[in-house]
Amino acid sequence: MLSDDELLRYSRQVLLPQIDVAGQLRLKQARVLIVGLGGLGSPVALYLAAAGIGQLHLADFDSVDVTNLQRQVLHGNADIGLPKVDSALARLKALNPCIELVPHRQALSEACLAEVIGGVDLVLDCSDNFATREAVNAACVAARVPLVSGAAIRLEGQLSVFDPRQASSPCYHCLYGHGSEEELTCSQAGVAGPLVGLVGSLQALEALKLLAGFGEPLVGRLLLIDALGTRFRELRVKRDPACPVCGGPHG
């Protein structure tokens, strides 16, 4: 049940008829993995902790660098040199002591990913490289756990939801295949801070919709964000029946 303190803390959220007390209880009972605590993971972690997700798994093997602070709002100047997971733990505990935080400070191997994802209800991919996204997607498909995936670089962002519980849902590999040979990172191409904040906030919103059971999640749809012109575009994405990850008898 929700305590009196929790009812007060989440009162503005509980007032929404789409969430109500029942939805807030579902959020309290939810277990969520956030992969990456950088530009995207910062708003995701802050908003999900504030919303009352009962158990947040925080995964990142990197440390805070001064170049992160322009966009990774989970961390501060005093955190430079600390593991991002440790910086996040301190910030999120101060934000909401009602939730449980589970740290994962090492890079998640394939076996470790399978174990962790098998024990959660939802995964948010906030990583910055294709190899991690592919590994997370494969583990989510195998465990039949929904995945909220976001990306941002320069002044462009993307967002989609992949839900292997739905027969018609594509997976990350259906959409992106084997990726690009010339994959750029923010350290090479740059990125605007508010853009990653926007994409991460939308990821957090999609997570709340999936966990509390309201609205229409971005399953089978890819949201494209053009920050330069402040334009949003949506593309339909179909499942690939020949996909080596989710197609065939394993889908």
Image: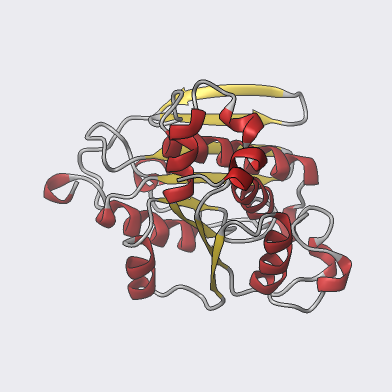
The residue positioned 57% from the left and 57% from the top of the image is 99
> Taking 198 as reference, is 142 above or below it?
below
The residue positioned 78% from the left and 79% from the top of the image is 81
Q: Check the image and name the residue furthest to the right.
A: 77
The residue positioned 66% from the left and 42% from the top of the image is 9
Q: How many marks?
A: 0
Query: Relative to 111, is 176 on the left or the right?
Result: right
> Taking 170 as reference, is 135 above or below it?
below
Residue 122 at x, y = what percent?
Answer: 41, 49
Q: Check the image and name the residue furthest to the front.
A: 4
> Taking 237 as reference, is 173 above or below it?
below
Q: Quadrant of residue 75?
A: bottom right
- Name the one closer to the observer, 53 or 7: 7
Q: Quadrant of residue 142?
A: bottom left
Query: Relative to 197, is 32 on the left or the right?
Result: left
- Name the one closer to the observer, 207 or 92: 92
> Taking 57 as reference, is 167 above or below it?
above
The residue positioned 84% from the left and 55% from the top of the image is 70
Query: Relative to 70, is 236 on the left or the right?
Result: left
